[in-house]
Image (cartoon, rainbow, N blue to C red):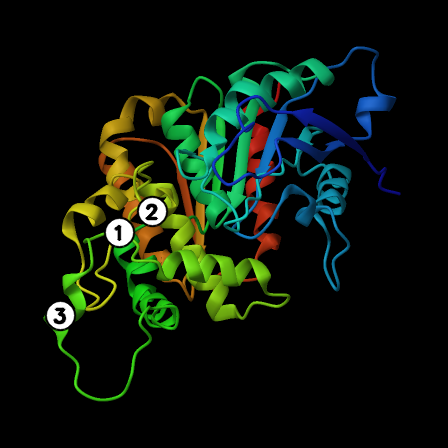
Amino acid sequence: MTRAGRMVVVEHESRVLKGNPLGDPHVRRFPVWLPPQYDQGPVGRRFPVLFDLVGYTGSGWSHTNWQNFAENLPQRLDRLIGERKMGPAIVVFPDCFTSLGGNQYINSSAIGRYADYLTRELIPFIDAEFRTLADRDHRGCFGKSSGGYGAIVQGMRYPEHWGAVANHSGDAYFDFCYRSDWPNTLTELTRYRKPERKAGAYDVERARAGLKRGLDDGRVRRFLAAFRDKDRPSGGEVMVLMNLCMAASYDPAPSAPNGFRLPFDLETGEIIEARWRQWLRHDPVHMVGDHKRALKSLKAIFIDCGWRDQFHIHFGTRQLSGALTRAGIPHRYEEFDDTHSGIDYRMDRSLPFLYRALKP
C-alpha cells in the first residue's frame, strides 16, 4: 500500500504585498505537502523543496482539491514516491492570485512584487517552518502556462534561489500566444467606450483625436469595474481580463490610467511598437541571451508543450528550446499529442526529473 503524505496549512503575512496597488490580501493561507518520510523517517531528516506555480486564474489550492477522474497533485506525489519514480520532497503551493486573475511571478508596479514575494519572503519562511535542505541546489519550481512562464523566468532572474525548473506550456513567443487574441479584446472593450458607438458615418481621425496612444480612455476602467460586479463572467471576458493582466505585468506605469499601458490603439487596433517592445523584453524567447550565465548555472531545465496547444505556445517553446541549444544550455524539451488543457499528467515526467536534479 502506498503511504500518504500530509497537508499542512500555513499562514504568512507579507510585507512585500502589503499596500499592493490592487488592494489584494497581504495575509495568505496556503498548503504545504509533506512526504510520508517527513514523519516516519530518521529524526531530523531534511528534504528538497519544490514550489508549485499555478497558471492564470489559479491559486496553490487549485492543485490540492479533489479532481474528477484524475489525481490531484498530493495524490500524484504519493503515487510517484510510492512507485519509487521519485524520492520524497516538500511541495509548497503558494497563493499568488490577484484581482486581475493572477500574475506572471514577476514584479510589477501595477500588480505587486510577486517575484520578491516568492524569493525574499516565502523561501525563507518555508525554510524556517519546515525541515528543508535550505539552499538553491535542493530547491526548484515548476508550473504550467503562466506558472511555467514563472518557473523559467524565475530560473533566469533568480538563479541564486532555484537549482532546477520545469516549464509546462509556459507563455513564450508573445507575437503568437498573446498578439493574436488582442483583436477580440479590443472588440469587447468597445462595449465600454464613451460615447457609445452608433451606426452610420465614422470619422476615424476624429475618433482617435481624443486618445493618448497606449493609455486607457476610460473603457478599460469601466470594463474592470463591470467585471468585478459579475457573478459569472464569460470565457471571452476572462480572456480580456487576462490580456489586461499581461499589460499590467509587462508594461506597468504608475502615472498611466489603471497603472499600465496598452500595446494597441483602442480604435484602430494598430500596434504601438514602443509598447510592444516592452512586452517582448519579458518574452522568454528573447530573454535567453541576457541570462545565459544564470541558465547555465541551473542543475536541470525541463520544458514541454502539446503540439496542439490552442494558444500556439508550442511554437514559442520550440523557439525557446532552440535559443537554449544555441547558447549551449543543457535542457530537456519534450512535445506530446495534446492541447493546453488538462495536462497535469505531464508532471509524471517533470517531478521525477526535478527530484533527480535536487536530491541530496
Location of the N terminus by quadrant is top right
Kindly identify which residue carries mark 1: 215
Number of numbered markers? 3
Location of the C terminus by quadrant is top right
Is residue 338 shown to the viewer in this render? no
- Residue at position x 38%, y 49% from top? 246
Secondary structure beneath label 1: loop
Disc 3 crowd, CA 10 A, few/some/many (<14, 14-19, 20+): few
Residues at circles 3 and 2 in contact by the CB criterion of under 8 Å = no
Residues at circles 2 and 1 in contact by the CB criterion of under 8 Å = yes
Toward the left, the furthest residue is: 205
Residue 87, image x, y percentages: 69, 30
Q: Amino acid at mark 1?
A: Leu
Secondary structure beneath label 3: helix
Q: Is residue 79 above or below residue 36?
A: below
Kindly identify which residue carries mark 3: 206
Q: 23 and 55: which one is in front?
A: 23
Disc 1 crowd, CA 10 A, few/some/many (<14, 14-19, 20+): some
Q: 336 and 275: which one is in front?
A: 275
Disc 2 crowd, CA 10 A, few/some/many (<14, 14-19, 20+): some
Kindly identify which residue carries mark 2: 257
Q: Amino acid at mark 3?
A: Arg
Is residue 42 shown to the viewer in this render? yes
- Residue at position x 56%, y 67% from top? 233
Figure quadrant of residue 34: top right
Q: Is residue 5 left or right of residue 108?
A: right
Measure the alpha-carbon separation of dots 3 and 2.
22 Å
Q: Is residue 192 left or right of residue 12?
A: left
